[in-house]
Image: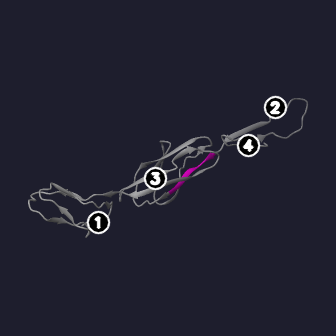
Amino acid sequence: VKTQPSGPSQSCSVANGTGTIGSADVTNVAITCATGTFTIGGTVTGLQGAGLVLRNNGGDDLTIAGNGPFQFAKTLASGASYNVTVRTNPSNPAQSCGVTNPGGTVAGSSITNITVTCMTDRFTIGGPISGLSGTGLQLRLNNETPLKVPAGAPNFTFPTLIPSGASYA
């Protein structure tokens, strides 16, 4: 084989490629080509929770245990498409993860530039107020600036968002 095929990337080999010509045509020189297969992966950052599951092409699932490199077990042939999504976001603390460079076409080499970035979800603190008829009520969250609550307010919500898993007082 002088030049291997591309688009898709393939590797070809020759069987019975040498011999001596006798009294008939040579018909047993066999060429076998196989499309190259490649891995799909990248890096996870910001993961603090547990239970992150990534999915490739709607069915190849991979559970991620921590930050760092990842690689799906199933390889894809050159010319095949890939699409990595977050199937399950982590919990404890609750996080939301996004995927950069999630999809494309395998072009003769492994995919290593997919980035999964996780951020801890943030939530408000608040609740109902009952029986308030006076003025001057102030509430404080984690010793920050007090929240002034007007007379007759049915509820309150602090403007500060607290990350999942964090304590509040």
Earlier-in-chain disc, 2 versus 4: 4
N-term-proximal mark, 3 vs 1 = 3
Q: Which residue is mark 3?
A: 63
Distance between the alpha carbons at the discs numbered 3 and 1: 28 Å
Question: Which residue in the protein does label 1 denote?
Answer: 167
- Seen at 85% across and 41% down, the residue is 18
Q: Position of residue 65 (x, y in %)?
A: 45, 58
Task: Identify the residue position indicated by label 4 in the image.
Answer: 4
Residue shown at 80%/36% (left/top)? 29
* Mark 3 or 1, closer to the camera: 1
Gap in angstroms between the C-alphas marked 2 and 4: 22 Å
- The vertical placement of 48 against 4, above or below, is below
* Residue at the limit of the structure toward the right, as seen here: 23
Within 10 Å of the Cα at label 4, are there few (<14), some (14-19), or many (20+) other Cα atoms? few
Check the image and report above or below for 59 versus 169.
above
Q: Residue shown at 15%/54% (left/top)?
A: 154
Q: Earlier in the sequence, mark 3 or mark 2?
A: 2
Task: Name the residue nearer the viewer: 126 or 47.
Answer: 126
> For this rendering, which residue is in front, 69 or 145?
145
Residue 145 % position (x, y): 25, 68
**For the residues bearing labels 3 and 1, Cβ distance under 8 angstroms:** no
> Could you tell me how far apart the alpha carbons at marks 3 and 4 are, in whole angstroms?
36 Å
Disc 3 residue type (three-letter): Thr
Q: Say which of 48 and 31 sits in front.
A: 48
Residue 26 occupies which quadrant of the picture?
top right
The magenta segment: 37-43
Q: Which residue is mark 2?
A: 27
